[in-house]
Amino acid sequence: MSNDTIEARRPGALLQRRRAEAAGWMFVSPAVLLFLVFVAGPFVFAIVLAFLKWDLLTQPEFVGMANFERLFSDPELPGVLWNTFVFAFASIVTHLLFGLLLALAVNSLISRVVGYFARVAIFFPFLISWAAVSLLWKYVLDPTFGYVGQYAAMVGIELPNFLADPAWALPAIIFIDLWHTLGFTFIIMLAGLQTVPSELIEAARTDGASSWQIFWTVTLPLMSPTMFFATIITFIGAFQIFDPIQIITKGGPQGSTTTIIMYLFEKGFQAFDMGYAAAVALLVFVIVMGVTLLQFLGRRRWVHES
Amino acid sequence: MTTGTGDVLVALERSGRRKARRRSPGGIVVDVVLVVFGVLMVSPLVWLIVQSLTQPEFAFASPPSWIPVPFTLQNFVDVFEYMPFFQQFGNSLLLAVISTAGALLFSVFAAYAFARIDFRGSRILMVVMLSALMVPAQLVIIPIFIMMRQVGLVDTLASLWLPALINVFQIFFLTQYFKTIPRELDEAARIDGAGHFWILFRMLIPLSGPAIAALAILGFEASWNGYFGPLIFLSSPENMTLPLGLVTLQNGFGAAPAVVVFAAITMVVLPLLVVFLAFQRQIVESVASTGLKG
């Protein structure tokens, strides 16, 4: 017999218990209500939508699996998925590599002023809206207006028109994303480095370990949970990249930068093919969840648990 | 998932307060590399400001000029001809304030219930809500768009802040944070006759200052910079937020000259830089006074 049931027999305790129940539900009710209206409800609605054909003007029509059949035989889809995965993969590799290197550098700095400058310079772009960043970089990478092309021309190099060249547009977007979002990964890495106890590093150093050995045997294993977290966050964010693409290239040239969310936007909010867009959105959901689960499954292989 | 918000801000500050290390030959190389990297990172922003201050005929000159000659403020004046800047600034501000404050209020209530009151169904409710973190925003935005259209809220700010009032991540983060505050404090307060609201507003919230500040900053930033939502819901220039207004400025009907676009971007970015530099110090203080460690 638990204490709870014995106490519950006393009338006062029962009343108190009821009061707690009521108070609990009272405090969560605004969140629950909003959750039902703006998260759970729309989620169910989205699944239903995927079985409809609806342009929002005429009556919705039930079409069964037609949207999914169309999705999987869509000649554009493989290219769109390829672009998205290339972007996400490149994003993870570049962010983690540069984020870690810069965090290590800032962490072992001599000058405080340089440290302050570096942190501000690396982190600040992350706070600027994608809208402003995209418009700015459109000009920076422009062969005639931008200073990159102008400096290159001065030394006799003719750079491609990055954003208008199907071979260069996606790499250019990857680069712009690195400039914009690196600060976030960098700060996460810096936070991870702070959790590495300096006593451990000092101890290893007194034992005669080289910096390189310390990095591989102490720092990196202790950083692996941070890197794991950064990998997941970067993947989820990168897979859903949209703003810079919609603003800079609109998915072009020749579809070379059409990622899955850009594609969803075109189908849903430009063609008003809501059912098909919902099917695309469900595909995004399944892929993001699947890859995230796989990352969790593979976690034991490389993430150090203390 | 708790790393990344509070932790991140703490680390940002802590690394800034680090003491200068002893000199080593490799260290100077690191310094130089970082300065060069920092300059490269900042260069697009410097270029932006320089062009926005240069007369249109002389802007984007080759070779690139890093000094605004001939200097002019006319581009900034012209911004107001092409876009309702103050109106859009106001919209962005209103949207960010309502979204951030509203979401925090409801998150605080829910987190209080999850962390402090034993009520039937709380575990299941938490699990259901947490699983929603996996749902991409783009999946639910289609039904929300249809709903907003039904109730006639498309092209209003409400279509953006209403869905923003629920933030599952905030609820989870705050629940975890509240749990780190000893429950004995509540019991002591309760013996003194305090009710739930008193405990929440007079005790838990003040004790969670840094966590709430971190969430507020992140929420404000997300709302202030949001583009996907405004792009889908807003269509009239006078209802737009700044990010959407900037993009429209550049590809709308009477597209503005590049220097004017640059002046507008500068008007958005410069205050942000000022706020960022100021807010860094503020975080240092809240961290120092309460010792947040996620």
Image (cartoon, coloured by chain):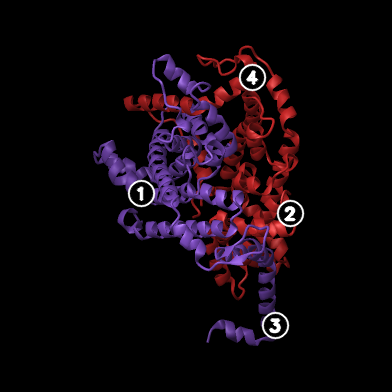
Q: Which residue sits at x=54%, y=49%?
A: B292
| Residue A160 position in % (x across, y down) | 42, 26
Task: Give the structural element (helix, strand or loop) at label 1.
Answer: helix
Q: In this view, does A74 lie above or below A114?
A: below
How far is disc 3 from disc 4 in space, using C-alphas?
74 Å
Number of residues whose C-alpha sits closer than 10 Å to that of mark 4, classed few (under 14), some (14–19) or many (20 or more): many
Which label number is shown at residue B153? 2
How far is disc 1 from disc 3 in space, using C-alphas?
52 Å
Nearer the camera: disc 3 or disc 4: 4
Which label number is shown at residue A222? 1
Quadrant location, the C terminus of chain A = bottom left
Which label number is shown at residue A212? none
| Residue B60 position in % (x across, y down) | 56, 19
Determine if marks 4 and 1 fall on one subunit.
no
CB atoms of marks 1 and 2 within 8 Å:
no
Chain at tag 4? B
Amino acid bearing label 3: Gly
How far is disc 4 from disc 2 in space, using C-alphas?
39 Å
Regarding residue A140, the answer to whether it shows in the image is yes
The answer to whether A111 appears left or right of A63 in the picture is left
CB atoms of marks 3 and 4 within 8 Å:
no
Quadrant of the rendered structure where residue B167 is? bottom right
Regarding residue A129, the answer to whether it shows in the image is no
CB atoms of marks 2 and 3 within 8 Å:
no
Mark 3 lies on residue: A12
Mark 4 lies on residue: B53
Nearer the camera: disc 4 or disc 2: 2
Chain at tag 1? A
